[in-house]
Amino acid sequence: MNKLKGSIETLNALQLTKDIQWLDEQSKTVLHSKEVLAVILQGTIEEYKGYSRKEIMEFIEKDSINEAKEVSVGRTNTEIQGECAEFVQLNEKTSRFDIVFRAKNPALSDENVLFSLHVDIEPQKTYRPGYPIEKRGIYYLARRLSSQLSLITEKTDYKQLEKCYSIWICRDDIPAKARYSISFYSMANIENIGENTALPQDYDLMSLVVIKLGEKDYKGIAEDSEYDLLHFLNIIMYPHKEDFMEEISKYIDFSENEELWEEVTGMEGLGQCILEEGIVQGMERGIRALILDHLEEKVPREKSIAKLQKHFGLEEEEARHYYGKYGAENQCQRGEGGAGI
């Protein structure tokens, strides 16, 4: 197994998810870590078969990692204009990608030209939110693909379009027979009447991956091809167990940082070794994501403030400060006026 050297930032993020109960904004924090992303991508991206996790880490364009990017019509690319109803619908509920980034497509890139994969990762508490997750995934893929082009004209160069992946990690409410399974959906040429000379890279532009967990204890077989991915996700997507450091170290190795490792092994619980600065940064990212999610779902202000106090241990005054800060940011992004939050 090709272990990755763990960074302090990743350890900070893992600390924030150690007591996670309902797979929310805190789970997104750990998905910003390139070490974590590399394990997930190795088990889901067709173009990365045969590559080590270290190589995959280098493929990820770190500066492209973004969260809470809007999916709604007319918002995935602020330059999109035109008369097509697809881009001018009004009063649509705003939706957001959870984690989006670009990564090198080694199948098409060479030393002179870089082609990217556009990846969206969506951690979900439930597989049954009241609609098919698969349909939502396809919708997100369509938005991700269309956002690559700005103003559509007669001269638009569709050769610029690059392949998109949407990876959904569903934790709870999985049908018994589907627990700990992975489903792949792609665009394919299924039939030809006469000769077809089209290249796969010209039509295979959207791939959906739905990962279904379902139980706190994973009883997979280590020899199975999907074991590493499912075991890894089981470790990080449920509340951490007593053997967490031992299990996570099978994938991400923190031992090379001797000072950090001594702190981890010499204290009760991973959290006591985390640097204060890293905790604050991670917490603020989680707080921001919760507030944006609640604003999207139109959760009442007081309920959101209570959630902030409960899940982040904030005083009421602190919770109100953050709600005002990120609520105002959300209004600014949407171009809304008003008296404020």
Image (cartoon, grey):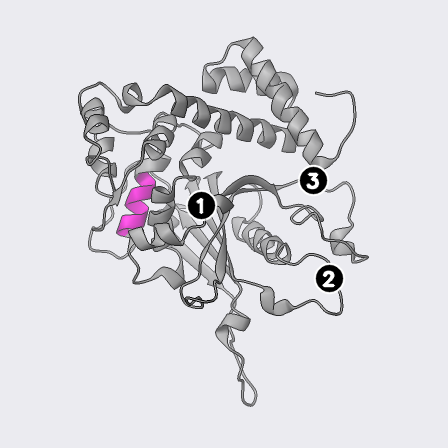
> How far is the residue under mark 1 from the one under mark 3?
30 Å
In which quadrant of the rendered view does residue 273 lie? top left
Residue situated in front as seen by the camera: 236 or 42: 42
The numbered mark, 1 or 3, whose residue comes first in the sequence reads 1
10 Å crowding of disc 2: few (<14), some (14-19), many (20+): few
Q: Amino acid at mark 2?
A: Ile
Q: Position of residue 259 (x, y in %)?
A: 21, 26
| Magenta segment | 227-234
Dot 3: within a 10 Å radius of its alpha carbon, few (fewer than 14), some, or many (20 or more) residues? few
Specify the amino acid type for callout 3. Answer: Lys
Q: Which residue is identified by label 2?
A: 152
307 up-or-down from 79: above or below: above
Which amino acid type corresponds to the residue marked 1 in the rendered image? Lys
Marker disc for residue 93:
3
* Disc 1: which residue: 62
Element at label 2: loop
Q: Earlier in the sequence, mark 1 or mark 2?
A: 1
Callout 1 secondary element: helix
Picture coordinates of residue 32, whole percent (x, y): 43, 39
Dominant secondary-structure state across the stretch colored magenta: helix
Foreground label between 1 and 3: 1
Residue at 65%, 59% (x, y): give it. 149
